[in-house]
Image (cartoon, rainbow, N blue to C red):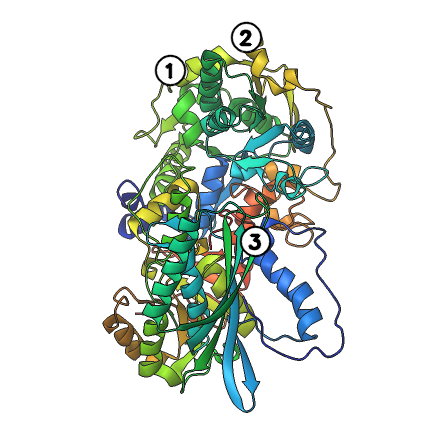
């Protein structure tokens, strides 16, 4: 997660009271938000950081650019559909994409554990090179650190990316209005459940692959077709769609109402969630994004996504209402409803 | 998805809801307790309260094993795992349940070796994989999970695995229902019986509820249609003035229960003379402990257990909520000091706890303007 850039002015009050850092602080849910808003933002960005987006927009000599950084600690390093190297490129490309920017260049930092087989490292560097090529982004530099055996788990990767802002689109939760439509690019939960199964701790298997990919082509198609109507975008990684939409509800002060039957979820993911007592809306994704679009642009947006490669399962999954202000409500097929909160705790640590 | 979607079919559900409205009429108020936490969770998750007429009140019962566990037992279990050679293994539900010095997860952040397992046999697997360590499985649950703990212990014994033990907190459902019925401030018309527990114990153990207490009970499944059908069956009985045990969950629950599971439990466990339940106090013969033949695998016999007793925070009204006397949001701490992220009482921790279910799914809905039309 990145935060908007600002020069620290006066030192602000630290509101973060948790006595120690726990796994939940890295899970992307409530605890993560508390840490960022309560400790990082006041000390690094002054009192009012504004909404926390996926990338910061910086102005250098009159040119605006999007800037973001992300670290990858996924376990296991490789899984069906992807690996840490590939994730490290696409994760940052996607953070820029949903901020309305095309990734232009990345720099990469490797933290390696002594004893890591060279073949494992090489495979991941190759995966990064391929993913960068596919996404049309240049890897412009990097750094390597090695720590003692046992002080890290094989390898961690950090990528920092800079992107060119697309014309004709402004991402701002403050512009979201009642009546706007909520779009989802495709089925949710594939990545999180794939990782969970790849760890081999559960005695069941399923034919499932991570959805990891660059979402930029889909974002570009959406912006091209519905640019002036696009109000907000986010890639629902850790914490899942529920967490991203709760952040939206809070940032815009409106209610997000979802229609359960419209939310695409593969049967394998649903099955695993039923068995494990998880909600697909809380499961991480690496190749999907959510968007809020003005109602008059919704059809054009869905048509454009459906025609773009990998966008055929895009759906309008809900809409913005006045109520329940600041919350996400999901309506069930038969007229019941429930509130969906952000992820609390961390059912699946180290998912990306 | 087969075996799930059939029971969430919107058309059938609206038919069942219509039937319930017809049977319930408007004259009379019905108070039905769903004993099982899984039902509580389903009621909120599927928004069933929105479908039922107002004169059918669902009261959440004591059937959430995490919620009824007194804090002292968590402290006892964690105190054993202070030994760096001990791995504390438990279901994910247990991980955020607060002890006096924090939850198992908080202990993990401070360096305790705490592992989430999905079944007791996974804990035994951990013991095989870590022969230099001792794996203690913190066992919780009603008769639903007790058989798998029993089978795991039988296997540990058969294989002679010595670096494994169970800290047993298994409880039994019938004494809890009896305690609820004995509670003077409790007025109930009927019970929605626990589906998963009944797969093991069957339906016979409930017969006294119908015979002696005159309350109908329907053992129910967990899908929306299951629960609505159970309400229909209860209404039929109540309108006719009958009280009998019925089995709605026949596709899973045999009337006589699961003999093999009961045999495994009888081989490994015996009843404790009494056990403390959070909110309900001490209930005699309401919990299980390991038999002497399994003493080598009994954490309470292998380790020094401090036997900590902790009283719940005075302001927390977990007991009243647990007995169904108060609704979750009527507790003074609900949503303020006590939230799923910072739970004070265990009802706020487990997804089957009525407070967490209420908080996650229902809280804030009150302010909703009811304009839920389709967007098509």
Residue A190 visible in the displayed image: yes
Question: Residue B202 at x, y = what percent?
Answer: 39, 22
Label 2 sits on a secondary structure element that is helix
Q: Which residue is mark 3?
A: A146
Question: Residue B161 at x, y = what percent?
Answer: 51, 17
Question: Residue B79 at x, y = what percent?
Answer: 69, 29
Find residue A69 and name its label: none
Mark 1 surroundings: few (<14), some (14-19) or many (≥20) residues within 10 A: few
> As displayed, is residue A63 above or below residue A273?
below
Q: Which residue is mark 1?
A: B259
Indicate which disc, 2 or 1, sits on the residue closer to the N terminus.
Answer: 1
Q: Nearer the viewer, mark 2 or mark 1?
A: 2
Q: CA distance from mark 2 to mark 3?
A: 52 Å
- Number of numbered tags placed on the structure image: 3
Give left or right: position of B102 versus B292.
Answer: right
Q: CA distance from mark 1 to mark 3?
A: 58 Å
Give left or right: position of A187 versus A5.
Answer: left
Q: Quadrant of residue A311?
A: bottom left
Q: Nearer the viewer, residue B35 or B89?
A: B89
Residue at point 58%, 72% (across, down): A3
Q: Nearer the viewer, residue A204 or A320?
A: A204
Find residue B293 and name its label: 2
Label 1 sits on a secondary structure element that is helix
Mark 3 surroundings: few (<14), some (14-19) or many (≥20) residues within 10 A: some
């Amino acid at each position: 997660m990145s935060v908007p850039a600002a020069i620290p002015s006066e030192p602000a009050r630290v509101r973060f009271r948790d006595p120690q850092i726990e796994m939940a602080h890295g899970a992307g849910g409530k605890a993560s938000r508390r840490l960022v808003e309560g400790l990082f933002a006041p000390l690094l960005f002054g009192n009012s950081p504004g909404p926390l987006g996926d990338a910061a927009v910086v102005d250098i000599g009159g040119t605006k650019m999007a800037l973001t950084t992300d670290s990858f600690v996924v376990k296991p390093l490789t899984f069906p559909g992807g690996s840490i190297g590939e994730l490290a490129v696409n994760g940052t490309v996607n953070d820029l994409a949903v901020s309305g920017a095309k990734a232009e260049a990345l720099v990469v930092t490797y933290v390696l554990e002594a004893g890591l087989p060279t073949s494992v490292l090489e495979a991941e560097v190759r995966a990064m090179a391929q993913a960068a090529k596919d996404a049309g982004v240049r890897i412009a530099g990097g750094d390597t650190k090695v720590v003692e055996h046992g002080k890290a788990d094989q390898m961690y990767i950090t990528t920092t990316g800079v992107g060119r802002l697309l014309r004709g689109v402004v991402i701002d939760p403050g512009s979201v209005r009642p009546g706007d439509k909520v779009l989802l690019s495709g089925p949710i939960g594939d990545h999180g459940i794939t990782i969970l199964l790849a760890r081999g701790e559960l005695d069941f298997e399923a034919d499932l692959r991570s959805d990891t990919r660059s979402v930029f082509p889909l974002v570009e198609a959406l912006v091209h077709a519905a640019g002036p109507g696009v109000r907000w975008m986010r890639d629902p990684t850790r914490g899942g769609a529920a967490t991203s939409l709760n952040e939206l509800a809070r940032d815009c002060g409106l209610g997000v109402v979802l229609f359960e039957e419209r939310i695409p979820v593969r049967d394998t993911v649903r099955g695993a969630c039923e068995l494990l007592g998880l909600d697909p809306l809380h499961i991480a994704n690496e190749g999907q994004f959510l968007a809020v679009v003005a109602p008059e642009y919704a059809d054009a947006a869905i048509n454009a996504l459906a025609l773009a490669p990998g966008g055929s399962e895009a759906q309008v999954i809900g809409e913005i209402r006045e109520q329940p202000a600041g919350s996400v409500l999901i309506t069930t097929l038969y007229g019941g409803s429930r509130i969906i909160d952000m992820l609390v705790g961390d059912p699946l640590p180290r998912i990306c | 998805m087969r075996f799930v979607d059939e029971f969430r079919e919107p058309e059938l559900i609206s038919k069942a809801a219509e039937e319930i409205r017809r049977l319930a009429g408007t004259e009379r108020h019905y108070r039905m307790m769903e004993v099982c936490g899984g039902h509580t969770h389903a009621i909120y998750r599927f928004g069933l309260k929105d479908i039922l007429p107002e004169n059918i009140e669902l009261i959440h019962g004591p059937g959430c094993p995490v919620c009824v566990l007194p804090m002292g037992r968590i402290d006892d279990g964690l105190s054993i795992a202070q030994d760096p050679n001990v791995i504390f293994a438990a279901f994910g539900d247990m991980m955020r349940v607060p002890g006096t010095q924090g939850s198992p997860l908080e202990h993990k952040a401070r360096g305790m070796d705490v592992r989430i397992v999905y079944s007791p046999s996974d804990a035994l697997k951990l013991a095989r994989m870590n022969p230099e360590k001792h794996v203690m499985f913190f066992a919780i649950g009603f008769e639903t999970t007790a058989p798998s703990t029993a089978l795991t212990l039988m296997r540990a014994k058969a294989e002679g695995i010595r670096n494994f033990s169970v800290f047993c907190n298994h409880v039994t459902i019938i004494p809890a229902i009896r305690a609820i019925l004995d509670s003077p401030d409790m007025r109930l018309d009927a019970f929605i019986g626990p589906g998963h527990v009944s797969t093991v114990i069957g339906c016979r153990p409930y017969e006294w509820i119908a015979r002696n207490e005159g309350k109908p009970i329907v053992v129910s499944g967990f899908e929306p249609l299951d629960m609505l059908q159970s309400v229909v069956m209860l209404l039929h009985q109540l309108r006719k003035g009958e009280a009998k045990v019925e089995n709605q969950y026949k596709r899973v629950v045999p009337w006589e229960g699961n003999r093999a599971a009961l045999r495994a439990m009888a081989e490994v466990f015996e009843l404790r003379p009494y056990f403390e339940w959070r909110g309900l106090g001490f209930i005699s013969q309401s919990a299980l402990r390991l038999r002497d033949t399994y003493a080598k695998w009994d954490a309470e016999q292998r380790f020094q257990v401090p036997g900590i007793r902790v009283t719940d925070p005075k302001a927390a009204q977990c007991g009243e909520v647990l007995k169904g006397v108060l609704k979750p949001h009527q507790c003074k701490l609900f949503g303020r000091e006590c939230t799923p992220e910072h739970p004070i009482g265990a009802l706020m921790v487990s997804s089957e706890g009525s407070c967490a279910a209420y908080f996650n799914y229902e809280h804030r809905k009150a302010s909703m303007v009811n304009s839920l039309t389709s967007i098509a």
